[in-house]
Each structure stands twice: as structure tokens, then as C-alpha cells.
Image (cartoon, grey):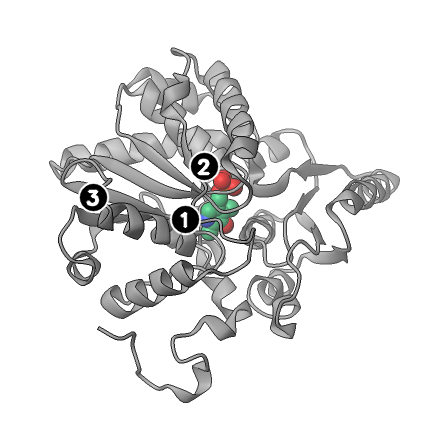
Amino acid sequence: MSALEAALAKAPRVALGHLPTPLEPLDGLSRALGPGPRVFAKRDDCTGLALGGNKVRKLEFLLGEVIAAGADTVITTGGVQSNHARQTAAAAAKLGLRCELVLPRMVTGRDPAYESSGNRLLDVWLGARVQIVERPADVIGAVQRIQAEAAARGGRAVFIPAGGSTPTGCLGYAAAALELAAQLERERLRVDAIVLAVSTGGTLAGLLVGLQALGLAIPVIGVGVYAPAAQVRPAVRDLAEKTRAILGGAALPEARIDLRDDWLGPGYGLPTEALREALAVTAGSEGLLLDPVYTGKAMAGLIALRRGRSLPGWNVLFWHTGGAPGLFAYPELAPSGDASHSPGRGPER
Ligand SMILES: *Cc1c(COP(=O)(O)O)cnc(C)c1O
């Protein structure tokens, strides 16, 4: 057993995901994109719990801790179309916990479907109580009220921050590094770079710490979808340091944190032309759905870097972090501009 495996085994954990997730070549996409490194995907959209996604890995450790603490309720937050909120609701349902979601309006100017479909609809199916609040600053007050209510009935409500990005949540992605290393070894595959979407930073931080603990120096390119890189970097650094402190091992060199914000566009949850193209080419060449907030922009980054011959080596791994339920909240992004009148029509080739 590696030192990383041993350290992870000490943390409370509940089994939630279909793990390991598949690691597969995207040869249709590689062909559609023309000459360049072969594209592979790590399918964390297939973690299995209520349509899956990256938060399932974090929740295995976060909810392990919640249960060990004897709490009966989890509270979390995120945008109205938060994938993290939906996965938390699903995990709570499975574990017999109450789930409270406090969702601020973070994205403006959206279609009416934005507040009733996609993840927001699934939250209700999964039995969560949902409060939509006007601003992120309103979240704290709502959380305190829920915690007081829980205490009054003799229960205990634990708050999980946006994205599940705490050092405990990051353990899920340190464990994912271990999972990837085993797959690469088994398949005798070498990946020369990893590309993934970065919002609250826990996925990137956990993965980097896990790879570091294993002595794997694969470059990881984080494509920012939430805020400019200068704003996200300190959060990633801090999460990485605290996660490393739990797991032991050497500090993460600053140079390992490679954050790009060239594909953020006008901001979080706001579409760009490059996003639209990435969604269409991936769906049309692979039958693979990305999402309109995170993975679509990360793939836009991968495509641009690949076209610009800026990716090292022969194989690039796209870490698919999920989010496709969000497509239902962005109907205008569908290739024809009208999803209901275009049976079978793929993107132009
Ligand atoms: C939350 C999320 C991310 C970003 O993960 P962070 O750990 O917050 O950086 C990426 N993709 C999808 C689909 C997500 O839901």
C-alpha cells in the first residue's frame, strides 16, 4: 500500500460513487479536431449518483465526516443550477440525511427555464428543501437559521461550502489521482497533460496533491470558469497546502498550479462562442455531452491549446467533471438554436 493510500484509508468515508470511472480514448473527437495529441477522457460524469459528476468523490469524504459527527442534516450552497447542490441532495437522500440547499442568484439574464429545469428540477426530485436567495451575501443568514432550527428539534446541521471545496472534500481528488495512476499502469498508457475545469478549486487542488504524493509530474492545466486566475490561485494554493497537511508528504511547488482564464468569457455561467463550439463538436463526434458552465469551457480551452500546438506530448486527458443536466437550462445553445425542431442534426463538419 502506498503512503497516500494509507493516509486516505484513515479518513472517514462513505461509498457513493461508481468507481473507478472509465478512462477512454475520444478518437472521434481527436479526428474531428485534426492533427494533434490523442484526446482521452476520465469519465467523472459517470460517477453514478443521480447523473454523476465530480462532487460525488468529494462527498464520499465530506459526508463520511458529517455522519461520524452524528449530524442529521447537511446544508450546502451554489448557483441555482449547481451540480454540487444536486449531488449533495442525492447523497443525502441515499444516506438518510436531510438536505437544505441555499442557492443565490449568481447568473443574470437567463431563460426562464434556468430556475425550474436541469439541476434545479432534480434537487426537488431528490427531496432537498431549496431556498433561492438574491445574493451570495444572503447565504450566511439562511444557513444560520437552518442550523438554529435543527438545534431546536434536537438535531445538528452541518454546512458544506460551495463546491464541497474543503481539505476534506479535496481528499476525494487525491484518491482520484491514485485511481488514475492505477488505470494508466494497467493500460500501459502515458498521458502528457491533463485538462480540467476549475471553479472553487478543490478538484484541481486535490488532484495535484494526490499526483505529487505519487511522484507523478503530469502537467495539469486548470481552465477557470468562475473567476480570473489571480483570484482562484490563492484558494487552490491554500486548499492544496491544507490537504497535503492531512495526507503528509512534500509541499506542492507553486509552479504546479497552472491556471488559465482565457476561456472564462464574460463570467460564470455565461456562454461564449468557443463553449458552443466545444459542446457541439464533442456531442457530434463522440455522442458525449459536456455542460454549459464548466466542462464546455474547459474543452474550449483544450481545443484552442491543441490547435495552437501548445499541448505537450502525444496524449492529453480531458477530466470530464460532469454537469450535463445544466444543458436543460441553456436550450438556446443547441446547434440549431432550437432544440425542438432539429431531429438528428449534428454540427457542421
Ligand atoms: C463543481 C464543478 C467543477 C469545478 O470543480 P471545483 O472543485 O469547484 O473547481 C467542474 N465541473 C463541474 C461539472 C462541476 O459541477
* Distance in Å between CA atoms under marks 3 and 2: 26 Å
Q: The N terminus is located in which quarter?
A: top left
Task: Tell me if residue 14 can be seen.
Answer: no
Sequence-first tag of 3 and 2 = 2
User: Is ligand 1 within 8 Å of the beta carbon of the residue shown at mark 2?
Assistant: yes
Task: Tell me if residue 8 can be seen.
Answer: yes
Give the class, few, some or many, for how many residues have Cα within 10 Å of label 1's Cα (few <14, many ≥20).
many
- Closest to the camera, between mark 3 and mark 2, is 3
Left or right position of 22 against 292: left
Image spot of residue 236 (x, y percent) = 50, 28
Numbered label attached to residue 173:
none
In percent of the image, x 76 and y 37: which residue is there? Answer: 156
What amino acid is labelled 3 in the image?
Arg
Residue picked out by circle 2: 203
Residue picked out by circle 1: 321
* Distance in Å between CA atoms under marks 3 and 1: 24 Å
What amino acid is labelled 2 in the image?
Thr
User: Is ligand 1 within 8 Å of the beta carbon of the residue shown at mark 1?
Assistant: yes
